Amino acid sequence: MLQIPLENKQLHHTFELYEKKFKGLSDKKRLHLLHILCERSSTCVCDDEIQMPQSKLSYHLKILLDAGLITKETKGTWSYYSCLFSR
């Protein structure tokens, strides 16, 4: 595999951010979650429309959070997620 050295640290950081965003958008389940979150102002993970085991849901939401595509607000024991951008 060809290794391309990145001398510019700012450019390297920018590429890492893009890599996270593209990873967040590269899965159909995550795209579906984003669609639901963008359709509503805020959604609790306990919502019945999201038909996915809790462990998988948490995994996908974490990737979207790390990519900076969604936000998380915790109220008591519940977590509410919302989209950071409009379509």
Image: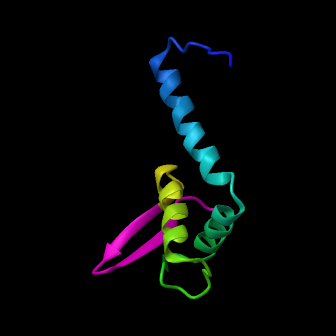
The residue at the point 60 percent across, 80 percent down is 50
From this viewpoint, is residue 10 visible? yes
Q: Which of 15 and 58 is in front in this view?
A: 58
Let me know if residue 42 appears in the view.
Answer: no
Taking 33 as reference, is 19 above or below it?
above
Which residue is located at x 47 percent, y 22 percent?
A: 10
> Is 70 in front, or is 23?
23
Q: Position of residue 16 (x, y in %)?
A: 52, 33
Query: Which residue reaches farthest right?
Result: 28
> Would residue 79 appear left or right of 64 to someone viewing this image?
left
- Which stretch appears magenta? 71-87
| Residue drawn at x 62%, y 62% as measured from the top left | 86
Q: Nearer the viewer, residue 59 or 13?
A: 59
Residue extending furthest left?
Answer: 76
Left or right: residue 81 compared with residue 40? left
- Residue depicted at 45% across the width and 19% down the height: 9
Residue 64 horizontal side relative to residue 72, left or right: right
Magenta stretch: includes residue 81 = yes
Image height check: is 22 above or below 77? above
